[in-house]
């Protein structure tokens, strides 16, 4: 019974993460292809579904704790589910932000061909899928791969920002559009951060190792 209840929670979490990933993909696809209907699907169809699934998972976790009063590994697993669904919900919120900025942009002349932003969206979608797979299969090596891959997203965001700054300097009429593109890049970078959180939580659940501070120390060392 305990195994079945845990499997149900994990299945729901997988479905929620897939929905959030699709929100990221559609919000970016709507921007690139300039299709408002895709963006509206993210805003008015997919986000309410993700919110409802988040509540359902929270309630399933609470019910599991009350009914089974788990200890040790089962308790860590449910506690991790609580935290992961928060990250997944925030990913959905950030995809909504992307869609909102995209709706503004598709009604305006294009500043530049979009190359790095779609790449960022593809990378963070891959990271989300891998982080959830690592959690479901308790694959610590895959979780560490996701954790390390976050640097790629940060580099792409910086590249987008540098390029957009040159456009704003050379043509001030592009400033508002560039700010929306920067916002999108920032949202995608934050989505990468949340997938990294999932990987960190998975590593802690499996091994008890806390690795979040390792990246902070690496960043500090890189600036000295």
Image (cartoon, rainbow, N blue to C red):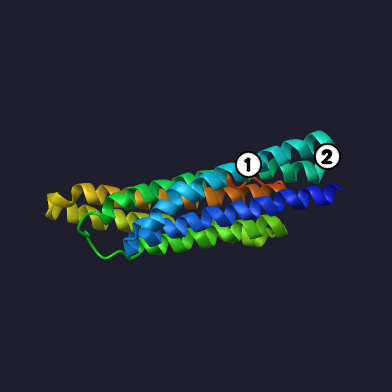
In this rendering, is residue 81 above or below 106? above
Whether pointer 1 and pointer 2 mark residues with C-beta atoms closer than 8 Å, the reply is no
User: Can residue 108 be seen at all in this image of the molecule?
Assistant: yes
Q: Nearer the viewer, residue 67 or 128?
A: 67
Q: How many marks?
A: 2
Residue at the disc numbered 1: 83
Residue at the disc numbered 2: 71
* Quarter location, residue 29: bottom left
User: x and y percent of residue 189 in the render?
Assistant: 43, 51
Mark 1 surroundings within 10 Å by alpha-carbon count, few (fewer than 14), some (14 through 19), many (20 or more): some
User: Can residue 144 be seen at all in this image of the molecule?
Assistant: no
Residue 148 has which mark?
A: none
In the displayed image of the protein, which residue is found farthest to the right? 1
Mark 1 and mark 2 lie on one chain; the one further toward the N terminus is: 2
User: x and y percent of residue 106 in the render?
Assistant: 28, 56
Q: Nearer the viewer, residue 133 or 162?
A: 133
Per the image, label 2 sits on a secondary structure element best described as loop
- The residue drawn where x is 40% and y is 58% is 38
Per the image, label 1 sits on a secondary structure element best described as helix
Q: Is residue 137 left or right of residue 221?
A: right
- The residue drawn where x is 31% and y is 61% is 34
């Amino acid at each position: 019974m305990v195994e079945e209840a845990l499997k149900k929670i994990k299945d729901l979490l997988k479905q929620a993460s897939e929905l959030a990933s699709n929100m990221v993909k559609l919000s970016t696809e709507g921007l690139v292809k300039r299709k408002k209907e895709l963006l509206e699907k993210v805003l008015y169809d997919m986000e309410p579904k993700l919110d409802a699934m988040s509540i359902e998972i929270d309630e399933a976790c609470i019910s599991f704790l009350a009914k089974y009063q788990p200890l040790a590994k089962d308790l860590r697993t449910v506690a991790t589910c609580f935290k992961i669904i928060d990250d997944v919900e925030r990913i959905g919120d950030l995809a909504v932000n992307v869609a909102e900025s995209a709706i503004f942009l598709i009604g305006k002349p294009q500043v530049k061909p979009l190359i790095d932003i779609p790449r960022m969206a593809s990378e963070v979608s891959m990271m989300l899928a891998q982080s959830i797979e690592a959690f479901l299969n308790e694959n610590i090596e895959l979780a560490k791969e996701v954790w390390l891959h976050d640097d790629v997203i940060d580099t792409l965001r910086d590249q987008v920002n540098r390029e957009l700054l040159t456009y704003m300097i050379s043509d001030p009429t592009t400033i508002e559009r560039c700010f929306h593109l920067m916002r999108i890049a920032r949202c995608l970078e934050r989505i990468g951060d949340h997938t990294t959180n999932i990987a960190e939580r998975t590593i802690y659940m499996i091994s008890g190792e806390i690795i979040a501070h390792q990246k902070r120390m690496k960043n500090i060392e890189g600036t000295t």
